[in-house]
Amino acid sequence: MLPPTGSPSAAAPAELQADVAVIGGGVIGHGIAWEARRSGRSVVVIDDAPGSGASWAAAGMLAPVSELHYQEEDLLELMLESSALWPAFAADLARDAAADAGYLATPTLAIGADAADRRALMDLRAVQQAHGLDVEPLTVREARSREPLLSPAISCALDIPADHQVDPRKLVACLRQALASHGEDPRSAVTGALDAFAVVDRASSLMWEDGRVTGARLAGGGLVTAGETVVANGLHAASLDGLPAGLRLPLRPVHGDILRLRVPDHLRPLVTATVRGLVRGVPVYIVPRCDGTVVIGATQREDALAASGPERGGGAAGVSAGGVYQLLRDAQVLVPAVAELELLESTARARPATPDNAPLLGRVNFPESRGHVPGLIVATGFFRHGVLLTPAAATICRDLMDGRTDPRWHPFSPARFSGRPSTVQPIKEHA
C-alpha cells in the first residue's frame, strides 16, 4: 500500500481565490481546513503529496496521560483540551463525510517488562496523579484476563481509560472526503481547485500586500490568494520563502520507524486495548486496528541514516534494520504471539520537533512588538502529538480567524524563538 498522491484532472488556473489557504496536507492541515470550512469559509489545501508525510506513518494514539513528560505542564493542558474534543470531532467528521473516521474509544494499558520498568512506570504514575490524571494499577492476573496474550512474565500493568486511538490514514481520507463534499452551499467550492478544495502543488512562498500576508505562490507558477493563510506544512515551514523578517522556526526532523503487521485469524484479537510498554527502559507500543492488523512502533532517531537516507518525499527516509529488530524483539517480550504475525509494512517518516517539544501554533506576535502579522497563522512543530492535537489546533486556528484569542495557548507562540524585528516585513523571496 502506497501513500496517497494527488494528480489534478486538468491544469489549475493561474490564480485561485479562497477565504483560507492551508499550506500542508497532513492531518493538522486537513483538520484546520475542515474546521475553517465548517465556520462558513471557502478553503484550499495546498500539498503536492497530501497525507504522505508524518501522518502516513503515525500510530494515532490519543494519549495525553501516557504522553505526559516531565516539565511539559503547558503542553499537558493543550493535550487534555484536545483529547476532550476528540469524540465530537470524530462524530461530526464521520457525519459530514459519511465515512468512518477511524476513532476508537478503547483504553490503553501501560505494561512494564521487569522490576526497573515497573519502578519507572510507578514513578511516572505519581507525576500523572499529581496532575489529577487517572492511572490505576492492575494485577498481572487482571491484565491478562483483559488481554490473554500478554506475557505472564510482565512485572506490572496500569489501566489508562482516557487514552484512546484513531487510524490517521482513515482520518485523512475522511477529512478529504468531507472537504470534497460541498452540499448545497456553492460558497464553499473554490473554482479551479481539485474537488473544489485541493491544490496539488507545493507552496514556494507567501505573498504580501500592504504589510499583510495575502496567500501563497505555487512552485508550479500559480497563485492562491486568501484572506487567511495557515502554514501547516511540517518541517518544510521553515524553508518557505516570504516568512516575516526575524521569524525563526527552529524545526528539526526526528525520524521514527513503524511496523504494520497482520494478525492471523486464530490469534484475533491480538490485543483489544493499545499496549504501551517499557522493556528494559525502552518504550514500545502495540496499537490494534479494526481490520485485523496492528501497528508497532516507538523508535526515535536523529542519526546519519535519517539524514542521508533515500528521500521519497513527505519526510520519508530509510528504515533502520536495527529499529525493526528492536521493535519486534521488545513487542514479543510483552506479547509473545507477535512472532506469529505477518509483517506487511515498515515505514520511516520525520516528525517536526522544536527545542521545547511544543508546537508553533498561532499568530506571529514578536516579543515587545504591537499586534500580529495580519493574514498569517502558523501551525507546525507538533512532533509526536500531531494527531492528538488536531482538534485543538483546528479550533484555535478557527478562533483566531474569528478574532478570538485564548491566553492559555500563548506559550506556543510561533515567534517565541525569534528576536524582535525592526519592522514586520517578508523575508526576500529566492529567485
Image: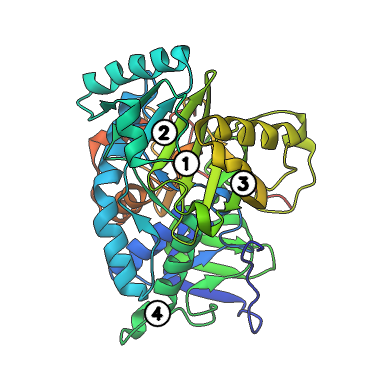
Disc number placed over residue 61 in the picture, else none: none
Residue name at image x 48 percent, y 22 percent: 113
Query: Going by the image, does 359 lie left or right of 261?
Result: left
SS assignment at label 1:
loop
Few, some or many residues within 10 Å of mark 3 (<14, 14–19, 20+): few
Few, some or many residues within 10 Å of mark 4 (<14, 14–19, 20+): some
* Residue 108 image offset from top left, x and y in percent: 35, 39
Label 1 sits on residue: 424
Sequence-wise, which precedes: disc 4 or disc 1?
4
Sequence-wise, which precedes: disc 1 or disc 2?
2
CB atoms of marks 2 and 4 within 8 Å: no
Q: Check the picture and name the quadrant holding the N terminus.
A: bottom right
Q: Which of 403 and 196 is in front in this view?
A: 196
* Residue 90 image offset from top left, x and y in percent: 31, 60
Mark 4 → mark 3, Cα distance in angstroms? 42 Å
SS assignment at label 3:
helix
Q: Residue 235 sits in which quadrant?
A: top right
Mark 4 or 1, which is nearer the eye? Answer: 4
CB atoms of marks 4 and 1 within 8 Å: no
Sequence-wise, which precedes: disc 2 or disc 4?
4
Label 3 sits on residue: 340
Disc number placed over residue 366 in the picture, else none: 2
Mark 1 or 2, which is nearer the eye? Answer: 2
Amino acid type indicated by mark 3: Glu
Few, some or many residues within 10 Å of mark 2 (<14, 14–19, 20+): many
Q: Is residue 363 visible in the rendered structure shown here?
A: no
Residue 219 vertical position relative to residue 186 in the rendered view, above or below = above
Mark 4 → mark 1, Cα distance in angstroms? 38 Å
